[in-house]
Image: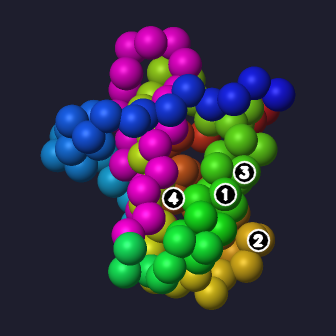
Amino acid sequence: MKRATTIKENYEFRRMYAKGKSGVSPCLVIYCRPNHRGHNRLGITVSAKLGHAVVRNRIRRRLREIYRLNQPRLKQGYDVVLVGRMRAVSADYQELERAFLHVCEKLSLLEKTV
């Protein structure tokens, strides 16, 4: 499986926070914005307030894997930023995935299935 194209620059994250649509759940926040590139780009942020590096990296790995497995269901041509929240520390994988899919549905990021 090909690696996801990522958002790395600070100005891109700031633009997403300022101009992107957002959806909120207790575990995560998703910001999305059309990018006119034909493919999705992913950015993940986790605050230092959530814990030490091991905890933050575990949340990042889980969010990246959830995105990777659900990427075929997502509409293409969007920048997506996932922000881990405090509840993500104690949430199991299934709870994070349910929250991700629920917020994607609210933001109309999921493709219509026939």
Q: Secondary structure at mark 3?
A: helix
Residue holding disc 1: 61
Q: Secondary structure at mark 1?
A: helix
Residue at the image point whose x is 70% and y is 53% from the top: 66
Image coords of residue 11 (percent x, y): 21, 36
For the view shown, which residue lies furthest in the right direction?
A: 1
Q: Is residue 77 among what the camera can see?
A: yes
For the view shown, which residue lies furthest in the front direction?
A: 53
Answer with mark 4 or mark 1, whichever residue precedes in sequence. 1
Q: Which residues are magenta?
A: 25-47
Foreground: 111 or 39?
A: 39
Answer with mark 4 or mark 3, whichever residue precedes in sequence. 3
- The answer to the question of whether label 2 and label 4 lie on touching residues, with beta carbons closer than 8 A, is no
- The answer to the question of whether label 1 and label 3 lie on touching residues, with beta carbons closer than 8 A, is yes
Does 29 lie within the magenta span?
Answer: yes
Using residue 108 as the reference point, say whether residue 10 is left or right of it: left
Q: Amino acid at mark 3?
A: Glu
Q: Quadrant of the N terminus?
A: top right
Q: Amino acid at mark 2?
A: Gln
Q: Amino acid at mark 4?
A: Val
Tag in front: 4 or 3:
3
